[in-house]
Amino acid sequence: MIIKEFSADGFKNLKNIDLSPAPGVNVIIGENAQGKTNLLEAIWILSGAKSFRGTKEKEMISFDGEYARLGALFEDSQRVQRIEAVISKNPRERRLSVNGVKQRYFSGLFGLLKCVVFTPEDLNLTKGPPEARRSFIDLCISQIKPAYSKTVLKYENVLLQRNTLLKNLALRQGTEADLDIWDEQMARLGAYISVIKYQYTKKLSLYAGRLYSELTSGKEDLKLEYRSSIYEDMSNFTDQWAELTKIYLDSLIASRGEDIAAGFTTAGVHRDDVSVYVKGISVKDYGSQGQNRSAALSMKLAQAYILCEETAEMPVILLDDVLSELDRSRREFIISKLKDMQIFITCCEPVARLKGKRYEMSGGRVLNKQR
């Protein structure tokens, strides 16, 4: 997958961006706060995913503007496609289209422009809170199965309703029987999400383990395990939906007293985690900074490889000032593993031995537009 043209104007501080990127490496150089990360974020938004910086849609528009315009012409193995977006402070003037066909939401772009982004925060993926790993796994799966993100959204809505009811019950408003309808929905959705996450984590462990072994010259091994707060062992239940749903429902019913006292749902896929082990030891609790970074890089690279395998398309890689955070051996390793993909790299200074088409950014503009 290759982005052949990209344009942006009014997206945060970006002004009149009009690029014809190289099919290989594209290096965006500039000092801090000049728009380099904004450029990658703009590309990422067109993949259909939420901002990797947590930016809300209304915050994407420049302070002194009314609109933000984004566009991309990209080629996959089948055809050339075009995405165009106009983000407006006036919701009625918001526009989004794919090949001229209107779309309602950016999430509808999932599965079209496939991207994988690496940020400095990703280097803390293994050492950070469980929420970071849950979100990472959800994103990875959604890129392969766009409908999965809708299921997760449904689950979150049911969870919100159940938690509201739990708080009311704590105030002696209503009865426990009122939980039945929400527990049944949560069990059905939660069982499905749990299985999909379990299966993806197994594959991620396989790919990341191979990469980590290569990165450490075979001296250390990496393993990932999906930790469910509902199921003790999922290895024998991957196809038994009825049984999985029943176990989930029984768990919710059994924990009602604890949930009412807490005022929230204490167990479910929203509380699950992925444990990461190096040489059989938790890298989060006992790993060195180098081990945590190597594990995180292996997981992110594995995301790209699995996306490529599952969709038969090589994703576009966005490296947001990650190379400066790594030592020479890890820099060379990550570039070598992405050499056949289109890459956009941001950095403050040129990286030695990094060849590619170069752009200089200042004040939200690309100063030397190369064609």
Image: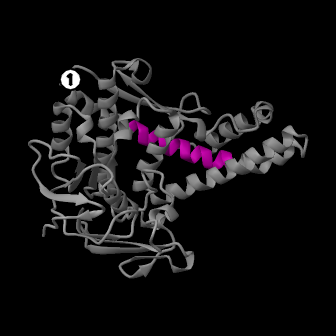
Q: Relative to 309, is 16 above or below?
A: below
Which residue sits at x=36%, y=57%? 41
Q: Nearer the viewer, residue 284 or 258?
A: 284
Q: How was the colour assigned to the protein in this rendering? A: one colour
Determine whether, in the image, residue 173 is placed left or right of residue 166: right
Which residue is the site of mark 1? 218
Note whether 315 is above or below 352 in the view shown.
below
Q: Residue 136: image x %, image y %?
A: 44, 44
In the picture, measured across the screen, residue 234 lies left or right of residue 213, that is: right
Asked if the magenta segment contains residue 56, the reply would be no
Along the line of sight, the residue nearer the viewer: 121 or 261: 121
Whether residue 236 is visible to the viewer of this picture, yes or no, is no
Query: What residue span does the magenta drawing correspond to?
Result: 186-202
Side of 188 relative to 209 (left or right)? right
Residue, x 44% and y 20% (percent of image)? 285
Residue 302: x and y, percent?
31, 41
Q: Which residue does the image show at 38% across and 18% down from the upper left?
A: 280
Q: Residue 205 appears at what percent x and percent y?
A: 36, 34
**Dot 1, how many residues are within 10 Å of its Cα: few (below 14), some (14-19), or many (20+)?**
few
Residue extending farthest to the bottom is 100
